[in-house]
Image (cartoon, rainbow, N blue to C red):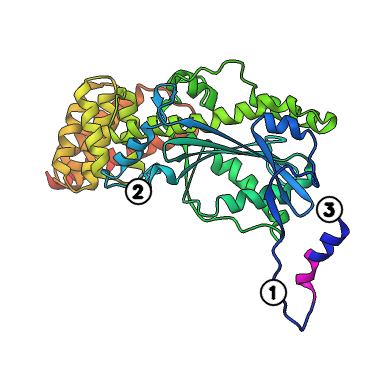
Amino acid sequence: MSIKNKLNRLKKHMVNTVSEPPVESKSHLENSTSERIQHADYWEKFGASAYFFEDDYCIVRKVKYPLDTQWGRYQFSDVLNAVSNWQDIDAAHPLHARDLDASDLLFFDTETTGLSGGAGNTIFMLGMSQIKGDHVLVHQFFLPGPGSEVALYHYFLNHVKELRNLVTYNGKSFDWPQVRTRHTLIRDYVPSLPEFGHFDLLHGARRLWKDKLPAVKLSVVEKEILGVNRIHDTPGFLAPMLYFQYCNEGDPSLLEGVFQHNEWDVLSLITLYTHMSRIVTGNGFRTEKETYESARWFEAMNEKEQAMSLHHEVIQTGTSLASQSKKSLAALYKKCNEIEISVQYWLELLDENELDEEPAVELSKYYEHIQKDYDKSLHFAVLAYSRWKGKKRLTKRKEEQEKQAFTKRIERLEQRVIQYS
């Protein structure tokens, strides 16, 4: 950056008794004869152009896909129904697109010079996809050199200033915090960061498929869940090395695979959000495990009615997960002060699994505190202790704590039986 421009930026910090109207910096998308960029012909053939800001620039690339394009199990147009179906769900959920249109969702991913956080890690590509009328628009913003961040973020932040909702994969922990970090370093020269909602699909993938998949990396979820098979993909871990090689050699063709990898990432996020939404809202096929995990997800949000409905659905399947759903239902009905229904589930669970002491513990509490029937309460307390003793414990400390709790309960109940006999 020239000394002249640096001095101009410092003017606002100087004391000046005469106020002057602000002069906006010139910026434009072009490859002009007066401001040539390196490898302009290559970038033009690649569908990219330069965005100039003062004496600097970044590279901007756009790609369009028709809405009826098939991407794995779904067409991009299916996200419209996925968002619409959320409007029928009167419950809080981390993926709820309440009062949003599909076009309000910005599917976002970054490519960085490293996987660690902090100011030493630079974002060299910001990628996003968005529904735009009859097509999906992929928009990529590329940093042609370490000194061009002001131009990059000036364009990007002006472009997303109306942003309502971000959709990412690990974006809450990595991508957007990295954007905030880089923004802090140049915030005097670029627009402010927008306020928005944020759907991080990594958390949903962990809930739904962590027991099914060897890992919940996006590439694994794409292949095993979404049916997206990438051919000749450039692995994400190679992106930093290719960028550094590009910075040293100046050959933009080195980055074609990185652009494609990022493009595929932001397109797969559309399909992944569609699929997750269909599972959770019940508007598509879902396995018993997915139904159960969806129920637990609503349960974690304290949405009892929605969780109970899904747990009942699991019970109808008659699978091994039915017992787990009965446990959850017993706890939920207890919270709703419908304790008699809880008792029925605990009695069923007592017969279904002779190694599980939890139903006996709950029944002992019920007969002690609700029914004041200390004989029955003692019976279930002894039964629970007997079942507990048949299990191996991971730690001696926890084993001793649990043993003391059982013996204390039994001793208290024995005294009450004697007292009221």
What residue does disc 3 label?
A: 1
Q: Residues within 10 Å of mark 1 (few under 14, many from 20)?
A: few
Q: Which residues are magenta?
A: 9-14
* Real-space Cα separation, disc 3 to disc 2, in angstroms: 45 Å
- Tell me the kind of residue under disc 1: Pro
Secondary structure of the residue carrying numbered label 1 = loop
Decide whether residue 161 is among the magenta residues. Answer: no
In the figure, residue 243 lies in which quadrant? top right
* Real-space Cα separation, disc 3 to disc 1, in angstroms: 24 Å
Out of 413 and 94, give the one closest to the viewer.
94
What residue does disc 2 label?
A: 98
Query: Does 378 appear above or below 100?
Result: above
Residue for point 29% across, 47% down: 91
Out of 281 and 396, give the one closest to the viewer.
281
What residue does disc 1 label?
A: 21
Residue for point 63% across, 51% down: 180
